[in-house]
Image: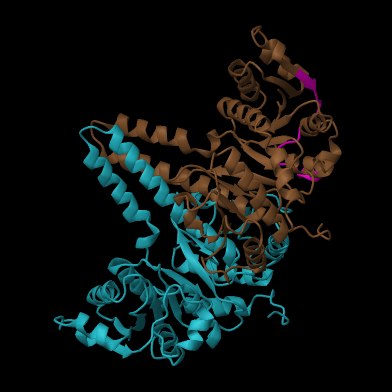
Chain colours: A cyan, B brown
Amino acid sequence: MRLALDAMGGDHAPGPIVAGAVKAVQCDPELRVVLVGDQSQVEPLLAGMPDVRDRLEIFHSSQVITMEETPVVALRKKPDNSISRCWQLLAEGKVEAIVSAGNTGAMVAGGLRLRLFLKNVRRPGIAAIMPTLKGPCVLLDVGANISPKPEHLYQYGVMGSIFAKHILQKPQPTIGLMNVGAEEAKGHDLAKETHTLFKASSLGDQFIGNVEGRDINKGVCDVIVTDGYTGNIVLKVCEGVFDFVMKMAGKELLGALQNEKHLGQQALQNLVKRYDYHEHGGAPLLGIDGICIICHGSSGERAIENALGIAAKYARASLNDRIVEELESSPHLSDSDE
Amino acid sequence: MRLALDAMGGDHAPGPIVAGAVKAVQCDPELRVVLVGDQSQVEPLLAGMPDVRDRLEIFHSSQVITMEETPVVALRKKPDNSISRCWQLLAEGKVEAIVSAGNTGAMVAGGLRLRLFLKNVRRPGIAAIMPTLKGPCVLLDVGANISPKPEHLYQYGVMGSIFAKHILQKPQPTIGLMNVGAEEAKGHDLAKETHTLFKASSLGDQFIGNVEGRDINKGVCDVIVTDGYTGNIVLKVCEGVFDFVMKMAGKELLGALQNEKHLGQQALQNLVKRYDYHEHGGAPLLGIDGICIICHGSSGERAIENALGIAAKYARASLNDRIVEELESSPHLSDSDE
């Protein structure tokens, strides 16, 4: 299993990124990681670790796309950037998966540019795994496709459902449509048309209708479908509220507790470890012919280690074959879409 | 100061709704509340309170729109419903404000139907007050206008700014546009066009550009403008995450604390009291010629009492005169909009 990791991507790159790769190959003896980035920066980070050095390759790339750059412009101006080189390795079949904590827009645009899509997939979508009272659920798209068509959202339902089944172990995943109310007639045109499309489709039995913002964490369904604009905002709102509530709770407890302040703080830290979005292993870009994992810009060693583990897991689960099969038999694809 | 309250609106109506009105008039000697609803249900709830009985009137209405009904259909089928009667009292100038915890869609549609808009206002918007690390901020629209035009969002900036100035006491309110990234070119067409409109407008100095989902609770600006679809989802996601985190924190603390479990629980309850969206006093529908406060369906006595207090406060602040003045001088209104 050979994966490529954007060694230059992320707020703290390359240090903790490379360290995450080292941990990942130490844990998984079948794993090889290609570190894509500036050799002069990456090489020294691998000094003194002979045990796994042979499963860590360096693929030199001289340029980096920063977090602030406009993706499409940056991809054009910096042809030797680490993100494009990752995509190149994937397109050439040299790796099974790519992982980056760099500029999300550039990562997505790099894939769109190559049109390295699975058969019949109109648009890839980023799937975020959300914590709920009943275990994880998948929310997609969270930012790859800002202005989708109903058909794209339908395909997100197909892909999310396969993901939930094979990765989250939900035998018969339920699908909900993010909307402003439970009634069928709610929402804008995109929401209404997508609702109709799902109901009439072969996913009709799995489709539970609209879900509202406050339903996500209740775990009312396994897959929540939405456009990339809304999904991206929802994901970040979750992050923001989580941070806010933990801060407020910390203060409140510090004031209220007397002899057990340390126990209270420890409990909150455990909660952060379990649910903090920064600690998670990244979100897959579904619909790509290959595995592509997009990590939070703030990813540290642990997040990168997790992301590489997840990438390997997805590759082993043959998710993509199942997506292709399912879309093959789906009658809800018009040829006119683009 | 005479206000109308939809006595039949809300999950727990009419009991706690009427009780909230009683509390409100007890606290504010200038307040008179018209309880709009089924006289046979409301009258008994006022038995035995001679001290404020003379400032609580009943306006009989025989029908109720339930939470599940489709607003436009229900308004047509039930002409004597309590929401329409509230609007009627406002339109006839018999009350200065109306308050309801009933069907939000019906409340908004009731206002749109009468077109009881302030001069130059294209569409009213619901303003939600959000807690942040730096005090409250206003998010609008959270559900009145699902598919707005850039100009509507611009007007939300105007109205939200006046609200922040006079109600939240922010001398020079800053305005942000909800979007998927900080860069100007981010987002769908609506976001991009709205960004351009704000930058070129007289609000240009107050406009800080795009804000992301995770910025809301950080308090990066005083007013956040968005479409009603996104705003409604954002508001409910905040509710949902808050509930989720408080549940998880409660469990975690209960397991971790030893002798101070009760102190920990008390601290969390204080937090809920301070931030719980169910406890707040409702959101104003800005842009209406009059004051209209929309409360959470789960509102209890305290929320209704707060909402009536807030309605009285807004009426006294002459918010609407200021909105009309500001829009009068705003050059960014095309005549063609509808």
Q: How many marks?
A: 0
Q: Classify residue B78 by image quadrant.
A: top right
Q: Which residues are magenta?
A: B58-72
The residue drawn where x is 76% and y is 18% is: B58
- Residue B87 at least partly seen: yes
The N terminus of chain B is located in which quarter? Answer: top right
**Secondary structure, magenta segment, majority class:** loop
Residue appearing at x 42%, y 80% in the figure: A65
Residue A208 sits inside the magenta stretch: no
Q: Can the viewer see residue A225 in this picture?
A: no
Left or right of B304, for residue B241: left
Q: Position of residue A238 (x, y in %)?
A: 47, 54
Q: Nearer the viewer, residue A309 or B28?
A: B28
Residue at (43% x, 73% y) in the render: A67
Which residue: 47% across, 64% down? A128
Query: Image quadrant for the C terminus of chain B?
Result: bottom right
Quarter of the figure with residue B75: top right
Q: Position of residue B289 (x, y in %)?
A: 77, 38
Q: Nearer the viewer, residue A86 or A13?
A: A13
Q: Outermost residue, bottom direction?
A: A92
Q: Is the residue A12 above or below the residue A122 in the image?
A: above
| Location of residue B283 with respect to A151 vertically, above or below | above
Q: Is residue B93 left or right of residue A176?
A: right
Question: Residue A83's spot in the image, x, y percent?
Answer: 42, 83
Up-down: is B151 above or below B99? below
From the top left corner, tell me how far across and down residue B229 is, in percent.
Answer: 65, 55
Above or below residue B284? Residue A50 is: below
Snapshot quadrant of residue B196: bottom right
